Amino acid sequence: MEASGSQQEEPRRLSSGDHESLKDTKNRKGGWITFPFLAVAILCLGLATAGAMSNMVVYLITEYHVPSVDAAQISTIIAGSISVAPVAGAIVADAFFGCYPIVAVAMATSVLSLVMFTLTASLPGLRPAACQPGAGPCEQASTGQMAALYAAVFLLCLGAAGARFNQATMGTNQFEATADRDVFFNWYFILLYASSVLGATVIVYVQDTVSWTLGFGVSCAASVVGLAALLLGARYYRHPAAQGSPFTGLARVVVAAARKRKVGVVAPGELKFYHGLRREDDDGKTGGDGVLPPSDSFSFLNRAAVITDGDVDGASGSALRPWRVCTVQQVEDFKTVLRILPIWSAAIVLSVAIGVQINFTVLQALVMDRAVGPFTVPAGSMIVGSLVSVVIFLGLLDRALLPLWRRVTGHTPTPLQLVGAGQALTVLSMAASALVERERTATVRAHGQEGDPAWASPLSAMWLVLPFAVAGAGEALHFPAQVTLYYQEFPPSLKNTATGMMAMIVALGFYLSTALVNIVQRATTWLPDNMNASRLENLYWLLTLLVALNFGYFLTCAKLYTYQNIIGK
Protein backbone atom coordinates (compact mmCIF):
# COMPACT_ATOMS: atom_id res chain seq x y z
CA MET A 1 0.00 0.00 0.00
CA GLU A 2 1.32 3.42 -0.92
CA ALA A 3 2.06 5.96 1.78
CA SER A 4 -0.12 8.52 0.09
CA GLY A 5 -3.07 6.24 0.38
CA SER A 6 -2.69 5.87 4.15
CA GLN A 7 -2.01 9.46 5.03
CA GLN A 8 -4.58 12.16 5.38
CA GLU A 9 -4.10 15.18 3.14
CA GLU A 10 -2.82 18.17 5.09
CA PRO A 11 -4.90 21.31 4.98
CA ARG A 12 -3.51 24.01 2.75
CA ARG A 13 -2.33 27.14 4.47
CA LEU A 14 -3.86 30.41 3.34
CA SER A 15 -1.50 32.57 1.37
CA SER A 16 -1.44 36.34 1.46
CA GLY A 17 -3.42 36.32 -1.79
CA ASP A 18 -6.13 34.19 -0.17
CA HIS A 19 -6.32 36.60 2.75
CA GLU A 20 -6.78 39.48 0.32
CA SER A 21 -9.51 37.54 -1.50
CA LEU A 22 -11.37 36.88 1.75
CA LYS A 23 -10.97 40.54 2.71
CA ASP A 24 -12.39 41.66 -0.64
CA THR A 25 -15.34 39.28 -0.23
CA LYS A 26 -16.01 40.57 3.27
CA ASN A 27 -15.82 44.19 2.15
CA ARG A 28 -17.82 43.68 -1.03
CA LYS A 29 -20.87 45.93 -1.13
CA GLY A 30 -24.25 45.61 -2.78
CA GLY A 31 -26.34 42.48 -3.21
CA TRP A 32 -29.52 41.38 -1.47
CA ILE A 33 -28.37 42.61 1.93
CA THR A 34 -29.34 46.08 0.72
CA PHE A 35 -32.87 45.08 -0.25
CA PRO A 36 -34.61 45.40 3.17
CA PHE A 37 -33.32 48.95 3.61
CA LEU A 38 -34.28 50.01 0.08
CA ALA A 39 -37.65 48.24 0.28
CA VAL A 40 -38.63 50.10 3.44
CA ALA A 41 -37.45 53.40 1.92
CA ILE A 42 -39.46 52.84 -1.28
CA LEU A 43 -42.58 51.67 0.56
CA CYS A 44 -42.57 54.48 3.13
CA LEU A 45 -41.89 57.27 0.64
CA GLY A 46 -44.64 55.98 -1.67
CA LEU A 47 -47.04 55.72 1.28
CA ALA A 48 -46.26 59.25 2.43
CA THR A 49 -46.61 60.76 -1.05
CA ALA A 50 -49.86 58.93 -1.80
CA GLY A 51 -51.26 59.90 1.59
CA ALA A 52 -50.56 63.56 0.88
CA MET A 53 -51.71 63.62 -2.75
CA SER A 54 -54.66 61.21 -3.04
CA ASN A 55 -57.00 63.46 -1.04
CA MET A 56 -55.67 66.81 -2.23
CA VAL A 57 -58.87 67.76 -4.08
CA VAL A 58 -60.95 67.19 -0.96
CA TYR A 59 -58.42 69.04 1.22
CA LEU A 60 -58.53 72.09 -1.04
CA ILE A 61 -62.35 72.12 -1.13
CA THR A 62 -63.10 71.44 2.54
CA GLU A 63 -60.23 73.24 4.29
CA TYR A 64 -59.25 76.01 1.86
CA HIS A 65 -62.69 76.57 0.31
CA VAL A 66 -61.35 76.34 -3.24
CA PRO A 67 -64.12 75.89 -5.88
CA SER A 68 -64.44 72.24 -6.88
CA VAL A 69 -63.31 72.53 -10.52
CA ASP A 70 -60.41 74.78 -9.53
CA ALA A 71 -59.39 72.25 -6.87
CA ALA A 72 -59.36 69.50 -9.49
CA GLN A 73 -57.23 71.71 -11.75
CA ILE A 74 -54.72 72.46 -8.99
CA SER A 75 -54.47 68.78 -8.10
CA THR A 76 -53.87 67.88 -11.74
CA ILE A 77 -51.04 70.41 -12.06
CA ILE A 78 -49.43 69.05 -8.88
CA ALA A 79 -49.71 65.49 -10.18
CA GLY A 80 -48.09 66.55 -13.45
CA SER A 81 -45.23 68.21 -11.61
CA ILE A 82 -44.65 65.15 -9.43
CA SER A 83 -44.59 63.03 -12.60
CA VAL A 84 -42.09 65.10 -14.57
CA ALA A 85 -39.81 66.17 -11.71
CA PRO A 86 -38.14 62.72 -11.40
CA VAL A 87 -36.82 63.09 -14.95
CA ALA A 88 -34.78 66.11 -13.87
CA GLY A 89 -33.69 64.30 -10.73
CA ALA A 90 -32.47 61.32 -12.73
CA ILE A 91 -30.49 63.58 -15.09
CA VAL A 92 -28.78 65.34 -12.18
CA ALA A 93 -27.93 62.03 -10.50
CA ASP A 94 -26.58 60.50 -13.72
CA ALA A 95 -24.54 63.52 -14.69
CA PHE A 96 -23.12 64.77 -11.40
CA PHE A 97 -23.68 63.11 -8.03
CA GLY A 98 -24.83 59.51 -8.40
CA CYS A 99 -28.06 58.12 -6.96
CA TYR A 100 -27.51 57.76 -3.20
CA PRO A 101 -26.79 61.41 -2.29
CA ILE A 102 -29.72 62.61 -4.40
CA VAL A 103 -32.11 60.03 -2.90
CA ALA A 104 -31.02 60.85 0.66
CA VAL A 105 -31.47 64.61 0.20
CA ALA A 106 -34.79 64.06 -1.59
CA MET A 107 -36.19 61.90 1.20
CA ALA A 108 -35.13 64.48 3.78
CA THR A 109 -36.94 67.11 1.68
CA SER A 110 -40.04 64.90 1.69
CA VAL A 111 -39.93 64.81 5.49
CA LEU A 112 -39.89 68.63 5.55
CA SER A 113 -42.79 68.68 3.10
CA LEU A 114 -44.93 66.40 5.25
CA VAL A 115 -44.06 68.44 8.34
CA MET A 116 -45.41 71.52 6.54
CA PHE A 117 -48.56 69.68 5.44
CA THR A 118 -49.14 68.63 9.04
CA LEU A 119 -48.69 72.22 10.21
CA THR A 120 -51.21 73.53 7.65
CA ALA A 121 -53.74 71.08 9.06
CA SER A 122 -52.97 71.67 12.76
CA LEU A 123 -52.35 75.44 13.01
CA PRO A 124 -55.56 77.49 12.51
CA GLY A 125 -53.59 80.48 11.25
CA LEU A 126 -52.36 78.53 8.20
CA ARG A 127 -55.84 77.94 6.77
CA PRO A 128 -59.10 79.93 6.57
CA ALA A 129 -61.77 79.62 9.24
CA ALA A 130 -64.27 76.79 8.88
CA CYS A 131 -67.50 77.49 7.02
CA GLN A 132 -70.53 78.25 9.19
CA PRO A 133 -73.86 76.93 7.87
CA GLY A 134 -76.19 79.79 7.00
CA ALA A 135 -73.51 82.42 7.64
CA GLY A 136 -72.97 83.36 4.01
CA PRO A 137 -69.99 82.65 1.75
CA CYS A 138 -67.03 80.82 3.26
CA GLU A 139 -63.89 82.76 4.10
CA GLN A 140 -61.31 82.52 1.32
CA ALA A 141 -57.70 81.55 2.01
CA SER A 142 -55.26 84.44 2.22
CA THR A 143 -52.19 84.75 0.05
CA GLY A 144 -49.96 83.75 2.95
CA GLN A 145 -52.04 80.67 3.72
CA MET A 146 -51.94 79.48 0.11
CA ALA A 147 -48.20 80.24 0.01
CA ALA A 148 -47.62 77.92 3.00
CA LEU A 149 -49.60 75.16 1.31
CA TYR A 150 -47.81 75.61 -2.02
CA ALA A 151 -44.44 75.57 -0.23
CA ALA A 152 -45.32 72.14 1.14
CA VAL A 153 -46.34 71.01 -2.35
CA PHE A 154 -43.10 72.39 -3.83
CA LEU A 155 -41.01 70.44 -1.32
CA LEU A 156 -43.03 67.31 -2.09
CA CYS A 157 -42.24 67.74 -5.79
CA LEU A 158 -38.54 68.17 -4.98
CA GLY A 159 -38.65 64.97 -2.96
CA ALA A 160 -40.25 63.09 -5.83
CA ALA A 161 -37.70 64.57 -8.24
CA GLY A 162 -34.76 63.13 -6.40
CA ALA A 163 -36.18 59.86 -5.16
CA ARG A 164 -38.71 58.22 -7.46
CA PHE A 165 -36.59 57.09 -10.43
CA ASN A 166 -33.29 57.18 -8.58
CA GLN A 167 -34.53 54.68 -6.01
CA ALA A 168 -35.09 52.18 -8.83
CA THR A 169 -31.71 52.92 -10.41
CA MET A 170 -29.95 52.76 -7.06
CA GLY A 171 -31.54 49.39 -6.37
CA THR A 172 -30.49 47.86 -9.67
CA ASN A 173 -26.96 49.19 -9.15
CA GLN A 174 -26.62 46.87 -6.16
CA PHE A 175 -26.73 43.78 -8.38
CA GLU A 176 -24.44 42.45 -11.09
CA ALA A 177 -26.59 39.58 -12.41
CA THR A 178 -29.37 40.51 -14.81
CA ALA A 179 -31.73 38.03 -13.15
CA ASP A 180 -31.26 39.74 -9.78
CA ARG A 181 -31.92 43.14 -11.35
CA ASP A 182 -35.13 41.85 -12.94
CA VAL A 183 -36.30 40.50 -9.58
CA PHE A 184 -35.57 43.85 -7.93
CA PHE A 185 -37.53 45.71 -10.63
CA ASN A 186 -40.52 43.43 -10.02
CA TRP A 187 -40.34 44.17 -6.30
CA TYR A 188 -39.92 47.87 -6.97
CA PHE A 189 -43.22 48.06 -8.86
CA ILE A 190 -44.97 45.84 -6.29
CA LEU A 191 -43.83 48.16 -3.49
CA LEU A 192 -44.75 51.24 -5.53
CA TYR A 193 -48.32 50.06 -6.20
CA ALA A 194 -48.75 48.65 -2.68
CA SER A 195 -47.71 51.96 -1.11
CA SER A 196 -50.07 53.86 -3.43
CA VAL A 197 -52.99 51.63 -2.45
CA LEU A 198 -52.22 51.92 1.26
CA GLY A 199 -51.84 55.70 1.03
CA ALA A 200 -55.07 56.11 -0.93
CA THR A 201 -57.05 53.95 1.50
CA VAL A 202 -55.67 53.87 5.04
CA ILE A 203 -54.28 57.40 5.26
CA VAL A 204 -57.15 58.95 3.28
CA TYR A 205 -59.62 57.17 5.59
CA VAL A 206 -57.84 58.64 8.62
CA GLN A 207 -57.97 62.12 7.04
CA ASP A 208 -61.71 61.83 6.33
CA THR A 209 -62.89 60.17 9.53
CA VAL A 210 -60.41 61.25 12.25
CA SER A 211 -58.54 64.41 11.31
CA TRP A 212 -56.36 65.93 8.63
CA THR A 213 -53.66 66.51 11.22
CA LEU A 214 -53.41 62.83 12.11
CA GLY A 215 -53.55 61.79 8.44
CA PHE A 216 -50.69 64.06 7.43
CA GLY A 217 -48.88 63.13 10.65
CA VAL A 218 -48.98 59.45 9.70
CA SER A 219 -47.57 60.34 6.27
CA CYS A 220 -44.83 62.35 7.96
CA ALA A 221 -43.96 59.47 10.29
CA ALA A 222 -43.78 57.11 7.29
CA SER A 223 -41.37 59.44 5.51
CA VAL A 224 -39.15 59.60 8.61
CA VAL A 225 -39.05 55.79 8.85
CA GLY A 226 -38.18 55.56 5.15
CA LEU A 227 -35.33 58.07 5.50
CA ALA A 228 -33.99 56.24 8.57
CA ALA A 229 -34.05 52.90 6.72
CA LEU A 230 -32.17 54.40 3.77
CA LEU A 231 -29.46 55.87 6.01
CA LEU A 232 -29.08 52.69 8.10
CA GLY A 233 -28.20 50.74 4.97
CA ALA A 234 -25.59 53.25 3.77
CA ARG A 235 -22.58 51.10 4.67
CA TYR A 236 -23.85 48.25 2.49
CA TYR A 237 -24.62 50.20 -0.69
CA ARG A 238 -22.56 50.16 -3.83
CA HIS A 239 -21.98 53.66 -5.20
CA PRO A 240 -21.18 53.65 -8.93
CA ALA A 241 -19.67 56.87 -10.19
CA ALA A 242 -21.84 59.28 -12.16
CA GLN A 243 -21.65 58.37 -15.85
CA GLY A 244 -22.97 61.56 -17.38
CA SER A 245 -26.42 62.15 -18.81
CA PRO A 246 -27.29 60.58 -22.18
CA PHE A 247 -29.33 63.69 -22.96
CA THR A 248 -26.09 65.65 -23.24
CA GLY A 249 -25.12 63.65 -26.33
CA LEU A 250 -28.53 64.28 -27.89
CA ALA A 251 -28.26 68.00 -27.22
CA ARG A 252 -24.82 68.08 -28.83
CA VAL A 253 -26.27 66.61 -32.03
CA VAL A 254 -28.82 69.41 -32.29
CA VAL A 255 -26.24 72.12 -31.53
CA ALA A 256 -23.58 70.67 -33.87
CA ALA A 257 -26.06 70.22 -36.72
CA ALA A 258 -27.27 73.80 -36.29
CA ARG A 259 -23.73 75.20 -36.22
CA LYS A 260 -22.86 73.27 -39.38
CA ARG A 261 -26.11 74.01 -41.19
CA LYS A 262 -24.17 75.33 -44.21
CA VAL A 263 -22.09 72.14 -44.55
CA GLY A 264 -23.37 70.07 -47.45
CA VAL A 265 -24.11 66.35 -46.98
CA VAL A 266 -25.35 65.52 -50.48
CA ALA A 267 -22.18 63.60 -51.33
CA PRO A 268 -21.37 61.56 -48.20
CA GLY A 269 -18.69 59.59 -50.03
CA GLU A 270 -16.53 62.71 -50.20
CA LEU A 271 -16.89 63.57 -46.48
CA LYS A 272 -15.10 62.33 -43.39
CA PHE A 273 -17.34 61.37 -40.49
CA TYR A 274 -16.30 61.22 -36.86
CA HIS A 275 -16.67 57.84 -35.14
CA GLY A 276 -14.91 58.47 -31.84
CA LEU A 277 -11.47 57.84 -30.42
CA ARG A 278 -9.06 56.18 -32.82
CA ARG A 279 -7.71 52.71 -32.16
CA GLU A 280 -4.55 51.13 -33.55
CA ASP A 281 -6.44 49.04 -36.09
CA ASP A 282 -8.66 51.87 -37.32
CA ASP A 283 -8.55 53.11 -40.84
CA GLY A 284 -6.84 56.47 -40.75
CA LYS A 285 -9.29 58.06 -43.15
CA THR A 286 -12.32 57.44 -40.95
CA GLY A 287 -10.82 58.75 -37.73
CA GLY A 288 -12.67 56.26 -35.54
CA ASP A 289 -13.76 52.75 -34.69
CA GLY A 290 -16.13 52.27 -37.59
CA VAL A 291 -16.24 52.86 -41.34
CA LEU A 292 -19.97 53.06 -41.93
CA PRO A 293 -21.33 56.54 -42.71
CA PRO A 294 -24.55 57.79 -41.09
CA SER A 295 -27.86 56.45 -42.40
CA ASP A 296 -29.79 58.36 -45.07
CA SER A 297 -32.84 59.03 -42.88
CA PHE A 298 -32.96 62.53 -41.34
CA SER A 299 -29.86 63.28 -43.40
CA PHE A 300 -29.86 66.94 -42.29
CA LEU A 301 -28.52 65.69 -38.93
CA ASN A 302 -25.54 63.94 -40.55
CA ARG A 303 -23.64 67.22 -40.77
CA ALA A 304 -23.24 67.03 -36.95
CA ALA A 305 -20.75 64.17 -37.51
CA VAL A 306 -18.87 65.75 -40.41
CA ILE A 307 -15.26 66.52 -39.52
CA THR A 308 -14.20 70.09 -40.35
CA ASP A 309 -11.00 71.92 -39.58
CA GLY A 310 -10.24 72.09 -35.88
CA ASP A 311 -12.90 69.56 -34.80
CA VAL A 312 -10.69 66.54 -34.06
CA ASP A 313 -7.19 65.99 -32.68
CA GLY A 314 -5.28 64.39 -35.54
CA ALA A 315 -3.07 62.30 -33.24
CA SER A 316 -5.53 60.87 -30.71
CA GLY A 317 -8.78 61.19 -32.62
CA SER A 318 -10.47 62.92 -29.68
CA ALA A 319 -13.00 65.67 -30.27
CA LEU A 320 -11.53 69.09 -29.60
CA ARG A 321 -14.91 70.80 -29.87
CA PRO A 322 -17.56 68.33 -28.62
CA TRP A 323 -20.38 70.83 -29.19
CA ARG A 324 -19.37 71.18 -32.85
CA VAL A 325 -18.72 67.57 -33.84
CA CYS A 326 -20.51 64.40 -32.68
CA THR A 327 -19.89 60.75 -33.31
CA VAL A 328 -21.92 58.92 -35.91
CA GLN A 329 -23.36 56.82 -33.09
CA GLN A 330 -24.66 59.91 -31.29
CA VAL A 331 -26.33 61.06 -34.51
CA GLU A 332 -27.94 57.65 -35.01
CA ASP A 333 -29.10 57.61 -31.38
CA PHE A 334 -30.85 60.94 -31.93
CA LYS A 335 -32.49 59.58 -35.08
CA THR A 336 -33.83 56.64 -33.07
CA VAL A 337 -35.56 59.09 -30.73
CA LEU A 338 -37.05 60.98 -33.68
CA ARG A 339 -38.38 57.78 -35.25
CA ILE A 340 -40.23 56.82 -32.11
CA LEU A 341 -41.63 60.27 -31.30
CA PRO A 342 -44.91 59.74 -33.24
CA ILE A 343 -45.59 56.58 -31.22
CA TRP A 344 -44.68 58.45 -28.05
CA SER A 345 -46.95 61.38 -28.89
CA ALA A 346 -49.91 59.04 -29.37
CA ALA A 347 -49.90 58.41 -25.61
CA ILE A 348 -50.29 62.07 -24.64
CA VAL A 349 -54.04 62.18 -25.29
CA LEU A 350 -54.44 59.07 -23.12
CA SER A 351 -52.76 60.90 -20.26
CA VAL A 352 -54.98 63.95 -20.82
CA ALA A 353 -58.12 61.83 -20.58
CA ILE A 354 -56.94 59.87 -17.56
CA GLY A 355 -55.91 63.07 -15.75
CA VAL A 356 -59.40 64.55 -16.19
CA GLN A 357 -61.04 61.25 -15.22
CA ILE A 358 -59.06 60.88 -11.98
CA ASN A 359 -59.87 64.27 -10.49
CA PHE A 360 -63.43 64.66 -11.73
CA THR A 361 -64.27 61.21 -10.43
CA VAL A 362 -63.37 62.53 -6.95
CA LEU A 363 -65.81 65.40 -7.48
CA GLN A 364 -68.49 62.94 -8.59
CA ALA A 365 -67.91 60.75 -5.54
CA LEU A 366 -68.39 63.72 -3.20
CA VAL A 367 -72.02 64.03 -4.38
CA MET A 368 -72.87 60.30 -4.48
CA ASP A 369 -73.68 57.63 -1.91
CA ARG A 370 -70.28 56.36 -0.70
CA ALA A 371 -71.60 53.99 1.95
CA VAL A 372 -70.42 50.37 1.78
CA GLY A 373 -72.03 48.57 4.69
CA PRO A 374 -71.05 50.40 7.89
CA PHE A 375 -68.19 52.25 6.18
CA THR A 376 -68.14 55.41 4.12
CA VAL A 377 -65.53 55.21 1.38
CA PRO A 378 -63.47 58.43 1.10
CA ALA A 379 -63.84 60.16 -2.24
CA GLY A 380 -60.06 60.28 -2.58
CA SER A 381 -59.90 56.48 -2.40
CA MET A 382 -61.74 55.94 -5.70
CA ILE A 383 -58.38 55.77 -7.52
CA VAL A 384 -57.72 52.48 -5.73
CA GLY A 385 -60.05 50.83 -8.24
CA SER A 386 -57.59 51.66 -11.00
CA LEU A 387 -54.51 50.59 -9.00
CA VAL A 388 -56.03 47.24 -8.03
CA SER A 389 -57.18 46.69 -11.60
CA VAL A 390 -53.63 47.24 -12.86
CA VAL A 391 -52.22 44.66 -10.44
CA ILE A 392 -54.93 42.07 -11.18
CA PHE A 393 -54.75 42.52 -14.93
CA LEU A 394 -50.95 42.29 -14.94
CA GLY A 395 -51.31 38.93 -13.20
CA LEU A 396 -53.94 37.78 -15.70
CA LEU A 397 -51.71 38.85 -18.58
CA ASP A 398 -48.74 36.94 -17.27
CA ARG A 399 -50.56 33.77 -16.25
CA ALA A 400 -53.46 33.45 -18.67
CA LEU A 401 -53.93 35.96 -21.49
CA LEU A 402 -50.41 36.03 -22.95
CA PRO A 403 -50.00 32.20 -22.84
CA LEU A 404 -53.40 31.91 -24.56
CA TRP A 405 -52.31 34.41 -27.22
CA ARG A 406 -49.14 32.40 -27.88
CA ARG A 407 -51.08 29.17 -28.25
CA VAL A 408 -53.59 30.71 -30.65
CA THR A 409 -51.22 32.80 -32.79
CA GLY A 410 -47.92 30.99 -32.30
CA HIS A 411 -46.00 34.12 -31.32
CA THR A 412 -45.76 36.71 -28.55
CA PRO A 413 -47.69 39.96 -29.07
CA THR A 414 -45.50 42.91 -29.98
CA PRO A 415 -45.31 45.96 -27.71
CA LEU A 416 -47.28 47.99 -30.25
CA GLN A 417 -50.09 45.42 -30.25
CA LEU A 418 -50.32 45.63 -26.46
CA VAL A 419 -50.29 49.43 -26.56
CA GLY A 420 -53.11 49.36 -29.12
CA ALA A 421 -55.22 47.05 -26.94
CA GLY A 422 -54.64 49.36 -23.98
CA GLN A 423 -55.72 52.39 -26.00
CA ALA A 424 -58.93 50.63 -27.05
CA LEU A 425 -59.76 49.89 -23.40
CA THR A 426 -59.16 53.55 -22.53
CA VAL A 427 -61.81 54.54 -25.09
CA LEU A 428 -64.26 52.19 -23.34
CA SER A 429 -63.28 53.61 -19.95
CA MET A 430 -64.15 57.18 -21.00
CA ALA A 431 -67.48 56.02 -22.41
CA ALA A 432 -68.21 54.18 -19.16
CA SER A 433 -67.49 57.36 -17.16
CA ALA A 434 -69.95 59.26 -19.38
CA LEU A 435 -72.67 56.64 -18.84
CA VAL A 436 -72.20 56.62 -15.04
CA GLU A 437 -72.40 60.42 -14.98
CA ARG A 438 -75.59 60.26 -17.07
CA GLU A 439 -77.19 58.06 -14.42
CA ARG A 440 -76.02 60.34 -11.60
CA THR A 441 -77.40 63.50 -13.19
CA ALA A 442 -80.66 61.65 -13.94
CA THR A 443 -81.15 61.06 -10.20
CA VAL A 444 -80.35 64.72 -9.50
CA ARG A 445 -83.03 65.88 -11.95
CA ALA A 446 -85.50 63.28 -10.69
CA HIS A 447 -85.22 64.74 -7.19
CA GLY A 448 -85.14 68.35 -8.39
CA GLN A 449 -81.83 69.05 -6.65
CA GLU A 450 -79.92 70.83 -9.43
CA GLY A 451 -79.62 73.96 -7.30
CA ASP A 452 -78.17 72.26 -4.20
CA PRO A 453 -74.41 71.67 -4.56
CA ALA A 454 -74.27 69.66 -1.31
CA TRP A 455 -77.01 67.18 -2.20
CA ALA A 456 -75.73 63.61 -2.61
CA SER A 457 -77.27 61.30 -5.18
CA PRO A 458 -78.57 57.96 -3.88
CA LEU A 459 -76.66 56.31 -6.74
CA SER A 460 -73.80 54.28 -5.27
CA ALA A 461 -70.34 55.75 -5.83
CA MET A 462 -69.13 52.18 -6.38
CA TRP A 463 -70.31 52.56 -9.98
CA LEU A 464 -67.32 54.87 -10.42
CA VAL A 465 -65.04 51.89 -9.85
CA LEU A 466 -66.16 50.37 -13.17
CA PRO A 467 -64.56 53.04 -15.44
CA PHE A 468 -61.46 53.02 -13.24
CA ALA A 469 -61.21 49.24 -13.49
CA VAL A 470 -61.37 49.40 -17.30
CA ALA A 471 -58.81 52.22 -17.33
CA GLY A 472 -56.56 50.17 -15.04
CA ALA A 473 -56.75 47.19 -17.38
CA GLY A 474 -55.81 49.47 -20.26
CA GLU A 475 -52.90 50.91 -18.26
CA ALA A 476 -51.65 47.40 -17.50
CA LEU A 477 -51.45 46.88 -21.26
CA HIS A 478 -50.15 50.16 -22.65
CA PHE A 479 -47.89 51.46 -19.86
CA PRO A 480 -45.48 48.49 -19.46
CA ALA A 481 -45.61 47.85 -23.23
CA GLN A 482 -44.46 51.39 -23.97
CA VAL A 483 -41.59 51.12 -21.51
CA THR A 484 -40.67 47.79 -23.13
CA LEU A 485 -40.83 49.35 -26.59
CA TYR A 486 -38.54 52.23 -25.69
CA TYR A 487 -36.11 49.96 -23.84
CA GLN A 488 -36.08 47.52 -26.76
CA GLU A 489 -35.69 50.09 -29.52
CA PHE A 490 -33.35 52.60 -27.93
CA PRO A 491 -29.57 52.15 -28.20
CA PRO A 492 -27.69 51.13 -25.01
CA SER A 493 -26.85 54.71 -24.08
CA LEU A 494 -30.55 55.62 -23.94
CA LYS A 495 -32.18 52.50 -22.49
CA ASN A 496 -32.33 53.96 -18.98
CA THR A 497 -34.50 56.82 -20.29
CA ALA A 498 -37.40 54.46 -21.10
CA THR A 499 -39.22 55.18 -17.83
CA GLY A 500 -38.42 58.87 -18.22
CA MET A 501 -40.21 58.91 -21.57
CA MET A 502 -43.36 57.67 -19.84
CA ALA A 503 -43.03 60.21 -17.04
CA MET A 504 -42.87 62.99 -19.61
CA ILE A 505 -46.06 61.67 -21.22
CA VAL A 506 -47.92 61.57 -17.89
CA ALA A 507 -46.77 65.05 -16.92
CA LEU A 508 -47.51 66.61 -20.31
CA GLY A 509 -50.92 64.94 -20.35
CA PHE A 510 -51.81 66.28 -16.89
CA TYR A 511 -50.74 69.80 -17.85
CA LEU A 512 -52.71 69.67 -21.09
CA SER A 513 -55.75 68.32 -19.26
CA THR A 514 -55.89 71.53 -17.21
CA ALA A 515 -55.74 73.52 -20.44
CA LEU A 516 -58.58 71.43 -21.89
CA VAL A 517 -60.75 71.98 -18.83
CA ASN A 518 -60.04 75.73 -18.94
CA ILE A 519 -61.11 75.84 -22.60
CA VAL A 520 -64.29 73.90 -21.81
CA GLN A 521 -65.07 76.28 -18.92
CA ARG A 522 -64.60 79.35 -21.13
CA ALA A 523 -66.47 78.00 -24.16
CA THR A 524 -69.36 76.16 -22.48
CA THR A 525 -71.48 76.05 -19.33
CA TRP A 526 -70.70 72.38 -18.68
CA LEU A 527 -68.53 72.86 -15.58
CA PRO A 528 -69.99 75.22 -12.95
CA ASP A 529 -68.80 74.98 -9.35
CA ASN A 530 -72.03 73.09 -8.54
CA MET A 531 -71.53 69.49 -9.72
CA ASN A 532 -75.27 68.82 -9.51
CA ALA A 533 -75.87 71.53 -12.14
CA SER A 534 -72.95 70.46 -14.35
CA ARG A 535 -72.88 68.74 -17.72
CA LEU A 536 -69.83 66.63 -16.91
CA GLU A 537 -71.23 63.86 -19.11
CA ASN A 538 -70.53 66.03 -22.15
CA LEU A 539 -66.88 66.41 -21.14
CA TYR A 540 -66.55 62.65 -20.83
CA TRP A 541 -68.08 62.14 -24.29
CA LEU A 542 -65.64 64.73 -25.65
CA LEU A 543 -62.77 62.75 -24.10
CA THR A 544 -64.18 59.56 -25.59
CA LEU A 545 -64.12 61.16 -29.04
CA LEU A 546 -60.60 62.50 -28.58
CA VAL A 547 -59.24 59.16 -27.36
CA ALA A 548 -60.96 57.34 -30.24
CA LEU A 549 -59.44 59.73 -32.80
CA ASN A 550 -56.09 59.35 -31.08
CA PHE A 551 -56.45 55.57 -31.36
CA GLY A 552 -56.77 55.97 -35.12
CA TYR A 553 -53.65 58.15 -35.13
CA PHE A 554 -51.79 55.50 -33.14
CA LEU A 555 -52.81 52.75 -35.55
CA THR A 556 -51.44 54.82 -38.43
CA CYS A 557 -48.14 55.43 -36.62
CA ALA A 558 -47.86 51.77 -35.66
CA LYS A 559 -48.51 50.69 -39.26
CA LEU A 560 -45.72 52.94 -40.54
CA TYR A 561 -43.24 52.13 -37.78
CA THR A 562 -40.43 49.66 -38.47
CA TYR A 563 -38.88 47.89 -35.51
CA GLN A 564 -35.16 48.58 -35.20
CA ASN A 565 -34.74 45.49 -33.02
CA ILE A 566 -36.10 42.37 -34.70
CA ILE A 567 -36.30 40.58 -31.33
CA GLY A 568 -39.37 42.61 -30.57
CA LYS A 569 -41.25 41.40 -33.64
Image (cartoon, grey):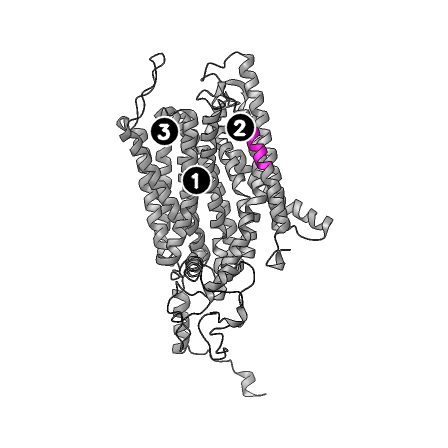
In the displayed structure, would residue 482 be above or below residue 462?
below
Magenta segment range?
A: 539-548
Q: For the residue marked with disc 3, what is the amino acid?
A: Trp
* Badge number at residue 212: 3
- Identify the main secondary structure in magenta: helix
Mark 3 to mark 2 CA distance (whole Å): 32 Å
Residue extending farthest to the bottom is 2
> For the residue labelled by badge 2, is the local secondary structure a helix, a strand or a loop?
helix
- Are the residues flagged by discs 3 and 2 in contact, CB closer than 8 Å? no
Residue 382 sits inside the magenta stretch: no
Whichever of labels 3 and 2 marks the residue nearer the N terminus, that label is 3
Q: Marks 1 and 2, Cα distance to the nearest angstrom? A: 20 Å
Task: Pick whichever, 294 or 199, lies toward us.
Answer: 294
Label 1, residues with CA under 10 Å away: few <14, some 14-19, many ≥20? many
Alpha-carbon span between mark 3 and mark 1? 24 Å
Q: Which mark is residue 80?
A: 1
Residue at 35% over, 57% down: 97
Q: Quadrant of residue 6?
A: bottom right
Mark 3 vs 1, N-terminal side: 1
**Which of the 4 image quarters holds residue 60?**
top left
Give left or right: position of 140 versus 338. Answer: left
Q: Which mark is residue 326?
A: none
